[in-house]
Image (cartoon, rainbow, N blue to C red):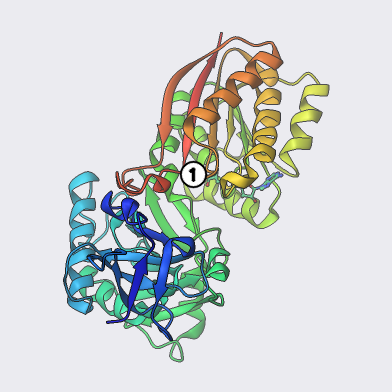
Amino acid sequence: MPVLILKQGREKSLLRRHPWIFSGAIHHADEDIASGSTVDLLSFNKQFLARASYSPQSQIRARVWTFEDEIIDKEFFRKRIRATIAARSATLPSPLTLLPLGDGDAIRLIYAESDYIPGLIVDRYNDVLVMQCLTAGAEYWKETFADLLLEETGLKIIYERSDADVRELEGLLPRSGVIRNSIIRESDDGQGFESRLTNIVITENNLQFNVNLQSGHKTGFYLDQRKNRLRVRELAKDKDVLDCFCYTGGFTVNALAGGAKSVISVDSSADALTLAQENIALNNLPADKATFIEGDVFQILRKFRDENRSFDMIILDPPKFAPTAAQAERAARGYKDINLLAFKLLRAGGILVTFSCSGGIDAGLFQKIIAGASLDAGVEAQIIEHVSQGADHPVSLHFPEGAYLKGLICLRR
Ligand code: SAH
């Protein structure tokens, strides 16, 4: 087994079970270790610390598979995948690995480092699994993962969406396409199969959504917002709602299902808005209560302010403004700007549902930004709920980086 020897004292984070080793912590690396292959991590005194995957091009040079002296092979990963699926079944309402599928049939089955399988993300959309390999280590074991996922879930189709930007940092090219399909051969029924992937229907809290697995964001849908969408449904009755950054209408559809009086939904992507409209029809919700605006939220909020428009509920679910701490300052200005404008558009007694999915902005800083926004807007507001990602996006206590989604539900007094 090739070895990496750490600099003196640099074993501390591993002793706390954090799974990453940065390049600056390495004293010695054996030569010609293949990308993604398994290495032993040793302390400066040559004590065994962990077994890890090697990423020669990444600043995160190694990611831990195990802290035990055990063999890393297919059976090792079978145990990890099985334990993760079992954990999901214990913490979420429906049996996830059984067919036929019921409510909640879209779910994050495996969440990388947070489920002790660094680099591997697996989302289940109805009867299709979508797999993302984000690191050299996950790429190395990709075929094994695909085989195991079929064996352990009983599902038949896996679509690969290894096209996230972070792969570049690992020296990996983007790749997407069908990686396993044991139902139909593409050549038999290419078109029908293709349209299944671009038009898969999932159920979430008894509502249905069309998802495009080929071109949708992330693996297709923002699964992390499941319980927050339900919360919006509960709060939306008789309200005039503004859903900013609506994507394919996750919050919009829930607001309508909750009896909103009207919903205006804004996104810069025309494709996302088309799908959002389809999703309203799919659930037989009143299309005449919904208005869609293709445009830049920053500009639309300003325009609404100048027009003295007002709302009973505003949802702000923007994209990641700060992927890392380095961009935090600029991102903070962006969050403050949209939240300040939203507070101004909110009627007394109105509700602001505001999120940040930026890894570089923690919950404490986010709350400070929102406080600053209300102050500058001249608006008094209270936090009525702190919200976060759902139970299928767990956070390992040893890997706080896994907690990225934070939200506040605020009431304007
Ligand atoms: N709320 C959505 C997810 C939002 S993802 C859900 O529950 O599914 C962020 C969305 O913001 C994307 O759809 C993206 O197209 C859109 N977006 C990014 N920048 C934007 C901008 N400046 N103005 C409007 N929309 C923007």
Outermost residue on the bottom side: it is 187
Q: Would you identify the image quadrant in which residue 217 lies?
A: bottom right
Q: Which of 29 and 249 is in front in this view?
A: 29
Q: Position of residue 381 (x, y in %)?
A: 56, 13
| Amino acid, disc 1 | Asn
Q: Residue sitting at 59 percent across and 54 percent down?
A: 275
Q: Residue sitting at 22 percent across and 49 percent down?
A: 94
Q: Nearer the viewer, residue 18 or 372?
A: 18
- In the image, residue 2 above or below residue 298: below
What kind of element bears circle 1?
loop
Q: Is residue 212 visible?
A: yes
Q: Where is residue 104 in the image (x, y as percent from the top left)?
A: 32, 50
Q: Position of residue 108 (x, y in %)?
A: 35, 55
Q: Nearer the viewer, residue 263 or 145?
A: 145
- Read off the residue under disc 1: 284
Left or right side of 154 for 320 = right
Q: Which of 112 and 147 is in front in this view?
A: 112
Q: Residue sitting at 62 percent across and 46 percent down?
A: 326
Q: How crowded is mark 1: few (under 14 residues within 10 Å), some or many (20 or more)?
A: few
Left or right side of 233 for 276 = right
If the image is split into quadrants, where does the N terminus sit?
A: bottom left
- In the image, residue 411 above or below residue 259: above
